[in-house]
Image: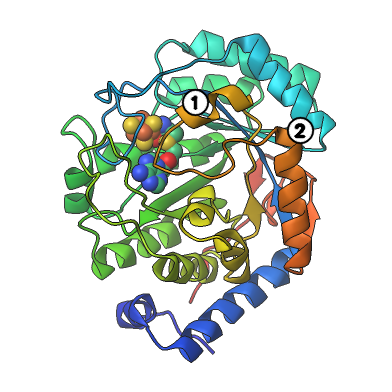
Amino acid sequence: MIRLREDNDILHFIQIEDAVEKDRLFQHARETCRQYYGDKIYFRGLIEFSSYCARNCSYCGLRASNRALARYRLTDEEILDCCAQGSALGYQTFVLQSGEDPHYTDERIVSIVSRIRRAFPQHAITLSLGEKSRESYEAFFRAGANRYLLRHETANEEHYRRLHPASMSLAARKQCLFTLKEIGYQVGAGFMVGSPFQTPEALLEDLRFLQELQPHMIGVGPFIPQSDTPLKAYPAGTLDMTLKMVALCRLIAPAALIPATTALGTISPFGREKGLAAGANVVMPNLSPKGVRKQYALYDNKICTGDEAAECRRCLENRLRVAGFTPDFSRGDHAEWNQESHSCKTAPICL
Ligand code: SAH
Ligand code: SF4
């Protein structure tokens, strides 16, 4: 039995080095995942539709001050084409992600989401567009969006301030997440592992915040330096620490949908498979046009930027089967999501 009730219990697992103990943690996390989702791994088609961003997060290659990056925007038609291609490949969830790009006004996002909703009435539409007002989130929801990904990045105030410009605040970020949940979205929070200045205590705060929010999805991936950012000289987060955090997130929010991120696959050749073995249950292959993928440069050396969407799907599907998992292309809603009432019946887990 793995106890995670007290802060010290959690800190112990954040810091364990012993291989046997780590394996026990990973196996317990995978078994917990299996109780809700079996060995299914859900596929989401990711469409990175704009690399312009008005913000200046210190870790991110899309930050506004990065003049070295060639930027791109997809047209509405191109976004719809990506969805059509994704649907033909079997995807039933589209994830539309971008920098915070004012070029895509609320009206335009509403129009894009409405068109996708009309063309694909049964698919899940996930947005990841950053911080917006309640009114904007409501408008996107009414247009047909079902889910929203907004990582909190770090739940420690001082750490948050060191990674972001003064114009951004942890309080605002957290408020967005609670607002999204109230509106009725399935919500994804999350954080980077090994970001500069991160401490074990900050990671504990991340887990405590997730326990409080009980998000439906949790994005946890390693920080990877991007060569045109102020944090370019800092080391990447490690595979080991990321796997521990994936497992602990699974135990803190047992029914959550947790991706084995592309960043995890970037720092280690079998990083994604290892993430799934440590309790993750989602992968997000890229549906963006091949020609623009390299320009969505959140971090250096991102994998899979040279493959067609169909190749990405086939490659990942094979890899997962070899690793003993069952690729699943259904919508893959949260296990306790009640679609009728657009609400979630997840009760806080008492650890
Ligand atoms: N602009 C939106 C969505 C795009 S950024 C937003 O910020 O929410 C998507 C995610 O990429 C961020 O939440 C962040 O956690 C991750 N990211 C950015 N830079 C990164 C880096 N250098 N290493 C790893 N992940 C990074
Ligand atoms: Fe922009 Fe998101 Fe990158 Fe921050 S993390 S600079 S908001 S794209």
Residue 339 visible in this rendered orientation of the protein? no
Callout 1 amino acid:
Tyr
The image quadrant where one finds ligand 1 is top left
Residue 305 visible in this rendered orientation of the protein? yes
Alpha carbon distance from label 1 to label 2: 19 Å
Q: Where, by quadrant of the figure, is residue 210 drawn?
A: bottom left
Is residue 26 shown above or below 47? below
Q: Position of residue 133 (x, y in %)?
A: 39, 24
Q: Where, by quadrant of the figure, is residue 199 drawn?
A: bottom left
* Left or right relative to 245: residue 335: right
Number of residue marks: 2
Callout 2 amino acid:
His
Labelled disc at residue 163 = none
Q: Position of residue 326 (x, y in %)?
A: 79, 61
Mark 1 / mark 2, whichever is N-terminal: 2
Is residue 326 shown above or below 30? above
| Circle 2 Cα neighbour tier, 10 Å, few/some/many (<14 / 14–19 / ≥20) | many
* Residue underneath mark 2: 123
- Closer-to-camera residue (99/148): 99
Which secondary structure lies at badge 1? helix
* Left or right relative to 143: residue 128: left
| Circle 1 Cα neighbour tier, 10 Å, few/some/many (<14 / 14–19 / ≥20) | many
* Residue underneath mark 1: 137
